[in-house]
Each structure stands twice: as C-alpha cells, then as structure tokens.
Amino acid sequence: MDASSIADEVKQCIAGFTGISTEILKDETSLFHDLGMDGDDAHDFMQEFASRFQVDLTHFVFSDYFGAEAAIHPLTLLTGVLGLSAAQQFKRLEIKCLIKAAVQGHFLR
C-alpha cells in the first residue's frame, strides 16, 4: 500500500471513530486540539489505530497528547490555577503524525 492510500485509510479510520467527514480532516488536524479527542475515547482510538495499521505504541507517551478521563484530574486543576489551557498542556498529535506512524509501523521518540 502506498503512502497516499495509507493517508486515506488513516483519515477513514478517524472519520469512522469520530463521525467526522474525511473531507474536513486535514494532515494538520490535531486529535485533541481540533477534534476534542481525549481520555478513554483517545485511548480506545489509539488502540484501534495501532491494531488496524500494526503500529507499535511502545514509545508513544499517551499523556503527552491527551488527558485522563476523570472529570476532575489533579493536572487539570493545577493547569487551571496556573492559567494554562488544555491546548497549552498537550502536544499536537496531528493526522500527518499518524500517517507517518502507519507507514513506519511505530512512533518516533
């Protein structure tokens, strides 16, 4: 499968999971920042993604990109006190990163 086909498949996987049209999904779309994926939903998606594209998640640090499911998480409280938004708290996991991981079979550190 070529990179273009993989990119289409990754976008279809995201669309199927979120219900968002593939036409809206761009390479720069972030799962958390733009689509609001977080907590258990993000965890479930990443597991589905890894299984579907046979991507090794060994070096993927979930907490760098997504928050916990709990409604009141200590980190959320701390960032609120410090005046940080969730968008500042997490790195962007963009669709282009998922495509690259699907092509390579793993995430880079």
Image (cartoon, rainbow, N blue to C red):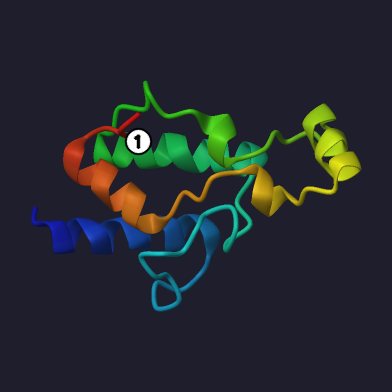
Horizontal and vertical percent position of residue 58? 37, 21
Could you tell me if residue 71 is visible in this image? no
Using residue 48 as the reference point, say whether residue 18 is left or right of it. right
- State the residue at coordinates (46%, 49%): 93
In-front residue for pair 52/39: 39
Callout 1: helix, strand or loop?
helix
Q: Residue furthest right?
A: 81
Q: Residue furthest top?
A: 58
Horizontal and vertical percent position of residue 44? 53, 38
Using residue 107 as the reference point, say whether residue 21 is left or right of it. right
Q: Residue furthest front?
A: 82
Horizontal and vertical percent position of residue 46? 45, 39
Q: Quadrant of the C terminus?
A: top left
In-front residue for pair 102/88: 88
Q: Which residue is mark 1?
A: 50
Could you tell me if residue 28 is visible in this image? yes
- Would you call the spot at circle 1 few (<14 residues within 10 Å), some (14-19), or many (20 or more)? some
Q: Amino acid at mark 1?
A: Ala
Horizontal and vertical percent position of residue 36? 63, 57
- State the residue at coordinates (30%, 27%): 56
Using residue 39 as the reference point, say whether residue 72 is left or right of it. right
